[in-house]
Amino acid sequence: MAAAVAGFRAAHGTEPAGVWAAPGRVNLIGEHTDTSGGLAMPFALPHTTLAAASARPDGVLRLHSANAPGGAVELLLDTLSPAAGSGWAAYPAGVAWAMREAGLPVGGADVHFTSTVPTGAGLSSSAALEVATASALNDLYGLGLTAERVARLAQRAENGFVGVPCGIMDQMASACCTTGHALYLDTRDLTHRAVPFDVAAHGLRLLVVDTRVRHELGDGAYANRHAACELGARRLGVPALRDVAYGELGAALEKLADDPVVRRRVRHVVTENRRVEEVIALLEAGDARAIGPVLTAGHASLRDDFEVSCAELDLVAETANAAGALGARMTGGGFGGSAIALVPDAAADAVAAAVTEAFAAAGFRAPRIFPAAPAAGARRLPTD
Ligand code: ADP
Ligand code: MG
């Protein structure tokens, strides 16, 4: 907080009107379902992006980030265009653009960002940046937007301005999560509810393992997965794979027998939605330990059916489970990024050590491992 204010002062030469925080996230279960209108269950990390900000009367966005080299970026709101390409500043500028596209009376701003969310690690630093910006502009210009609307505008910024065809899960997680809870999210209509997930109260720890690799086949591969899901839905005669009930899966797979790839993609999405329902039922029954095998089954499905895992993520899941985790899975888009492991307190150090050793033995870069308890979603920080 103090660093955010001091950074703002240094970058803009004035005092900020306020400071807004938005977290990164991990997804507990429900991966690659949000582009099929499916279910997900992310929770917010304690790591946040802070936006210290003030309104400006001249229609200029002056953006500065402690995490990006090159100093302040100045953009004129009236000339913002998705094709312009302004590096990291496209994320916050895209939010202002999306708000104006939606007819909202948003004007210029000075903003300084600081962040503890690792970037490019599958922990959604991009959504944290967008949601922090949207929260700041929402308050500075008295827009009165709900958290869901903030999330939608942030997604619109990333889709329409930055050019990343992401679903809505990351932005909803950053905007709507609450401390001590995961967020049960229906990505079709954005209905959501907080599900108690107080890991410490269950004698558990949730370890996040940042593999620190990102294999660059991502973009084309995601577009290809998305196309396969749409093709599957079309062939099954439903608007989206969300509409294939788990009980209808056998019949659906039979219809797709001539296309083994689409068949596997469909099986992932339908079983993954089912796993979200299983995890909710277990958490609401107070049985957090029992979700472990569901997480591990989710990893197998992403590895074998959706085919978005990689050697590093597989090694985390296998090693963590062999060393005493209750379950483990990749989280986020895949092809690198991060994995999570649910571990009993007593096994946490052994699991972390085993993963670190296995990475060294495999010749992989040392992973970054840290425990994370479900933290708060976006908010304005109190100033004193
Ligand atoms: P992830 O969301 O998993 O961290 P992305 O590739 O979606 O990965 O987003 C990472 C990008 O977001 C960075 O390369 C950078 O352009 C931008 N970004 C995120 N946080 C910040 C920040 N605090 N300051 C500047 N740019 C940021
Ligand atoms: Mg991102």
Image (cartoon, rainbow, N blue to C red):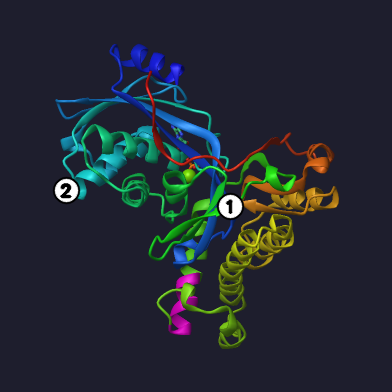
* Location of the C terminus (image quadrant): top left
Residue 88: x, y in percent?
40, 33
Give the residue type at disc 2.
Gly
Q: Which of the two residues, 129 or 120, is positioned nearer the viewer here?
A: 129
Q: Report the front residue among 214 and 315.
A: 315
User: Height in image: 266 above or below 143?
Assistant: below
Point out the frontmost of discs 1 and 2. 1
Name the residue beneath numbered marker 2: 103
Q: Position of residue 287 (x, y in %)?
A: 70, 59
- The amino acid type of the residue labelled 1 equals Pro
In x, y percent, where is residue 294? 69, 63
How many numbered marks are there?
2
Left or right, residue 314 beside residue 13: right
Residue depicted at 63% across the width and 59% down the height: 283
Is 236 within the magenta?
yes
The N terminus sits in image quarter = top left
Residue 231 in magenta? yes
- Of mark 1 and mark 2, the one earlier in the sequence is 2
- Magenta residues span 229-237
The image quarter containing residue 258 is: bottom right
